[in-house]
Amino acid sequence: MVAHHRSFTIILLSLSILQFSPSAKAIRKDVSFQLKRHCKTTVQGRFYLADDNGYVCDAFSVDPRSRCCPGRGDQFSCQGCNIVSQCCNSYEFCVSCCLHPQMINKELASNVQIAKPVTAVGNDLKLGIYGNIFDYCAGRCRHNSESVVHENAYMSEFHHCFSIPTNSSGSVIETVNISMTESSSTQLERLAGINVIVGRQGGSCDSVCKSNGKSCVPNKLSLLNNCQVMKKYMSCKGACLSSVGADQPAEVVDDAPTYLNPGACLYTERQSTLSCDGSHSHTRRLCPCA
């Protein structure tokens, strides 16, 4: 009878240990299903892709479950990028560089209008803006109109750009420049001693000035990059439009294709692109020579 009572007591103790043992909780915690984060990735490249963690990898290295790159190499890599212009020669590294916390103001980026909402998958299409910083970088690096000249040719191999546009939209402004800080007469006074010469079609300011026995003065280009000033030297009969290109300020020749706005004068809002050696086959440049 005593032996039977002891056996019953041992069974009760064993059940209590199994029910309240801390090790049992630890086992449950180890085998429980943990939520695993899934990455957003670019889909444009043939060989590489960038994830929203800021890594670039080849398609074979992507985790099949999380869709994340393995995390090897540089995070937020700006390989092949010009940090000043914020343009890159590779789409995937453009996205990776754009995701760097110090590169882009996330609040401003989230309010940028989508350039091509039909192809911008995953964004807030109803509002027409990017939903998050990754969508901004992926879309901006692909559709940035500031990387083309006259919307039909790339300015350079660094044509994947992620800079926030000055008008907070994905399009180029085509309006007359009325944001002058100086009067046109004051700007003309600052051109004292400078010969302003209208170049030949397709010529650069370097070649225009050289053919006149002079040299182009690059720091005076900004004074000519103005509609009121251009109209004093050019007809601008096709209006005065904002564009992007190293050939500006310039006038589109009359026999240019219709989509290039024949007869229009062109100025740029990106002062950093002003250059003496820029040219375009369908424009005539306005050049400061001395």
Image (tube, rainbow, N blue to C red):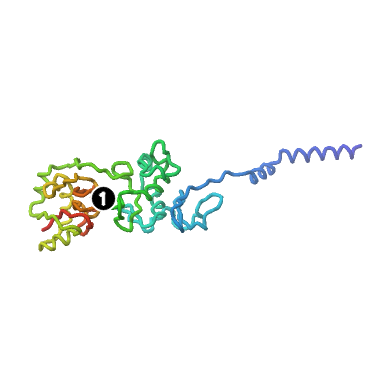
The amino acid type, in three-letter code, at marker 1 is Val
Does residue 237 appear left or right of residue 148 in this picture?
left
Q: How many marks?
A: 1
Q: Secondary structure at mark 1?
A: loop
Which of the two residues, 265 or 18, is positioned nearer the viewer here?
A: 265
Instruction: Say if 27 sits above or below 283 in the image.
Output: above
Quadrant of the rendered image containing residue 77: bottom left
Quadrant of the rendered image containing residue 240: top left
Please state the horizontal and vertical placement of residue 200, each as a whole percent of the image.
Answer: 16, 58
User: Image point 34% across, 51% down: which residue?
Assistant: 161
User: Image point 56% across, 46% down: which residue?
Assistant: 36
Picture quarter with the C terminus: bottom left
Quadrant of the rendered image containing residue 124: top left
User: Image point 35% across, 41% down: which residue?
Assistant: 113
Instruction: Say if 278 sits above or below 186 in the image.
Output: below
Please state the horizontal and vertical placement of residue 12, each as a whole percent of the image.
Answer: 80, 37
Picture quarter with the N terminus: top right
Residue located beneath label 1 in the image: 244
User: Image point 74% across, 41% down: which residue?
Assistant: 18
Please state the horizontal and vertical placement of residue 280, each as a whole percent of the image.
Answer: 23, 57
Which of the two residues, 127 or 12, is positioned nearer the viewer here?
A: 127
Q: Residues within 10 Å of mark 1 (few under 14, many from 20)?
A: many
Q: Residue furthest right?
A: 1
Please state the horizontal and vertical placement of residue 144, each as a whole percent of the image.
Answer: 34, 49
Does residue 247 appear left or right of residue 66 in this picture?
left
Does residue 76 appear left or right of residue 34 in this picture?
left
